[in-house]
Amino acid sequence: MKNKKILKAEENGAEKISAKETLKNALDIFDFSSGIAVNIENLDLYYGNFQALKQINMLIKPNEITAMIGPSGCGKSTLLKTLNRMNDLIDGCRIEGKVEIGGKDIYAKDIDLSALRKNVGMVFQKPNPFPMSVYDNVAFAPRTFGVRKKAELDEIVETSLRRASIWDELKDRLNRNALGLSGGQQQRLCIARSLAAEPKILLMDEPTSALDPISTGKIEDLMNELKTDYTIVIVTHNMQQATRIADKTAFFYLGELVEYADTQTLFTTPADKRTENYITGRFG
């Protein structure tokens, strides 16, 4: 029979393993082994009587950067928000068709929204750090998913800030209010905050539009590094940015997906005249 010390040691070990794996394994209900990260089929989206998206069909592969381009109001950001159901927050929004993440229909009645939003992170156009310390910003998601031990939180915070290429800039400022950072630092902090939840997909809605060229370059370099471990979908009005970072590009116009192809192909030999007119500056 095991004595109390051995039993206590085993309990502590089990607790340590459980706590360490809590965030990594929590709510991971999606399977990306098929080689498809996102599958959109015949998607129609309505705001009341207005149809914002019309018969969208897209396949997005894991570990690629997909850029969505097109003039304002064409449906890019609307589609991005369907991928983690942010549109649920808009009154009168109605969706028909299918949106699958990792093989699961995310609009099925039994989908766990916490699981969805853990696996599909979001970075917005304007940096939106919480009015708290740098450390607490990054630790927010791990704490939400049950990580409590300081040593484990310290590890997650450091790892996330390193992944966001901002650890060296912030390691001595972890206890300072995040609102005191520069715009570029705030945006990379927001990326680190998203990465701390261990997502599979990172959505980015014009993440550099409010930044200076140097900060923009840092974010673009970061995205190219992150795609090794994450699938990235970005909305951008900057066509040069799409050519620099995206593996594939989708052109939207008036709620329709006009063309979706390898970025180099779309920009050099577009198949649709509307795409050609847009990328050559004839409208938009």
Image (cartoon, helix red, strand yellow):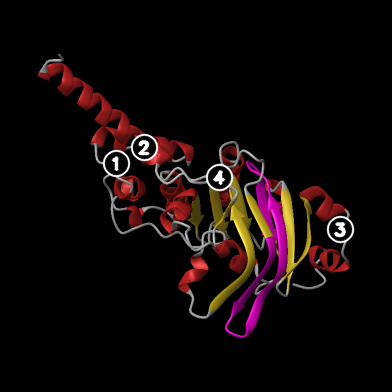
Report the Cα–Cα distance between label 2 and label 3. Answer: 43 Å
Q: Which label's residue is closer to the chain start, 2 or 4?
A: 2
How many marks the image carries: the answer is 4
Q: Which residue is mark 1?
A: 147
Task: Please state which amino acid type lies under the numbered disc 4.
Answer: Lys
In this picture, is 71 found above or below 270?
below
Magenta run includes residue 255: no
| CB under 8 Å between discs 2 and 1 | yes
Q: Which region is colored magenta?
A: 41-68
- Pair 2/4: label in front: 2
Q: Residue furthest bottom?
A: 49
Measured in 3D between alpha carbons, the distance from the residue under mark 1 to the one under mark 3, in whole angstroms, is 49 Å
Residue at mark 2 to residue at mark 4: CA–CA distance: 22 Å
Asked which secondary structure carries label 3, the reply is loop
Q: Select label 4 or label 3 by which is in front.
A: 3
State the SS at label 2: helix
Q: CA distance from mark 2 to mark 1?
A: 10 Å
Dot 1 surroundings within 10 Å: few (below 14), some, or many (20 or more)? many
Q: CA distance from mark 4 to mark 3?
A: 29 Å
Q: Main secondary structure of the magenta part?
A: strand
Mark sitting earlier along the chain (1/3): 1
Write down the residue under mark 2: 156
Measure how far apart labels 1 and 4 are at the Cα level.
30 Å
In the rendered image, residue 152, in percent from the top left (x then y), is placed at 30, 34
Within the image, what quadrant is residue 158 found in? top left
| Disc sitting over residue 218 in the figure | 4
Q: Amino acid at mark 2?
A: Ile
